[in-house]
Amino acid sequence: MPNIKISTEHTLTGLITLHRDRSLERRKGGDGHGSSGHGGSSDGSHGDSSDSTAHGGTGGRSGSTVPAAFKSSPASKPFSLVAGGAIKGSASAYSNGGGSRFKLSSETPFSGRQAGGGTRDDIYGTRIYGSGYPYGGTGSYIGGRPFPYVFYPVVISPYENYYGANEIYVLNDTQRTGGELSSVIIQPANTSISNTANTYRLIGDLPSVNAVYTALLASSPSCGIANSTITPFKPTLNTTAPTPEQVVQYYRASSFALSLDTYNNSASSLANMPTNTSMPLADTPLPTDLDPTFLACLNSTIGESVPLVDLSHKLNGGEIFGIVSSGVFLAGWLTLVILLCTGCCVLGKKVEVDDMMKGMKVEDDPGKTTSASERDAEYKLVGSEGFHDDVSKTEETVRWNY
């Protein structure tokens, strides 16, 4: 049964029924403290690739059809990953992700750390920072964890020690996988729905925020959002929105989030942050005056559209050498076959000519007296010159055909 974590408690059953076809089947994308329910070590050790390139994973929808209006927008195009150029490849909205896990290179801030392999099936986390890891989500804090979706977690708190985010907090925009952190306000276009009670924000890397915002505008059936402007986001002590307490849903291993301005989840406050080995407090219920249908539409559309990596396989030195060696061997083998075939054809023609020569009779002219020596000379001339010329032409023809 689709688990729409963000719905208000007293309307959850109705929301699930109403939006079953627009929500993704959610696995244990977090147990409230960052664990995925899949186990795994803190470094997510798995696989043996040492190349900072994800292997495979393009295409494939998980959920519903991509809206036609989105397909025709610039946001539908894949965008290159940033990360200072250390991670090669691109990401696309509505991609299913997946592929093999790999190790980040020494050119990244997280050399040797596992990354990749995350699919859309595990896209949903919870309301707690550090949730939604399909693997490597041991403990409550994110420090030392892998990056299943290649994107690094968002920086949502002005306190760098928030849930062990010290290593993420110090990154600049060019070091982050998707580049600059950004935010955009999401409000209903329908004036009958209160803007005050239904002001949401998307938080993530700029291209992902742009793609999801465009997907919400193009959604069919329409979520009905008003036009807005994407702005850079950097949390400070003076930030009033978005804050960790306002997040109603994390996605993509906490690298993307949806917040509600009127929500205040005490379980997400710095004061109530658990230790790495303990469980967080229970979430504060969502406000009762929000529009549940609008919220559910936002949640399902974000889950379907938030970009995932779809990097092509990058050949290493050994693979390139193998391909070149195989190509050289194949070319040599084909050349040998051609030469053998050519030789056999020419030899066959020569044997055929010899047989013709042996079976040929020289006819005497009844009206002409020819000595034996003259006949021998005439035969020798025809046999050694006339047929020799024919064989030469045959050899030339054989070479030309091949």
Image (cartoon, helix red, strand yellow):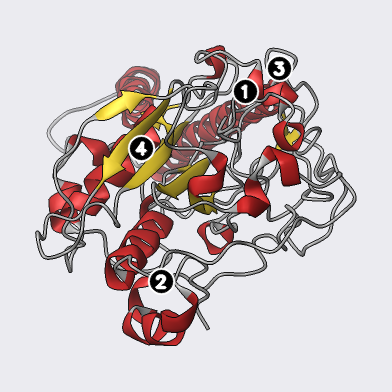
Disc 1 marks which amino acid? Val
The nearer-to-camera label among 3 and 1 is: 3
Compare residues 8 and 124 and report the one nearer the observer: 8
Disc 2 marks which amino acid? Ser
Give the mark, 3 or 2, whose residue is nearer the N terminus. 2
Residue 87 appears left or right of 345: right
Which residue is rendered at x = 76% and y = 64% of the image?
A: 37
Instruction: Tell whether label 1 touches label 3 (CB within 8 Å).
Output: no
Which residue of the protein is positioned furthest toward the left in this rendering?
A: 191
> Which quarter of the rendering shows the C terminus?
top left
Q: Under tag 2, what secondary structure?
A: loop
Where residue 324 is drawn, which disc sits there?
A: 1
Disc 3 marks which amino acid? Pro
Which residue is rendered at x = 78% and y = 31% of the image?
A: 113
Give the mark, 3 or 1, whose residue is nearer the N terminus. 3
Which residue is rendered at x = 34% and y = 78% of the image?
A: 19
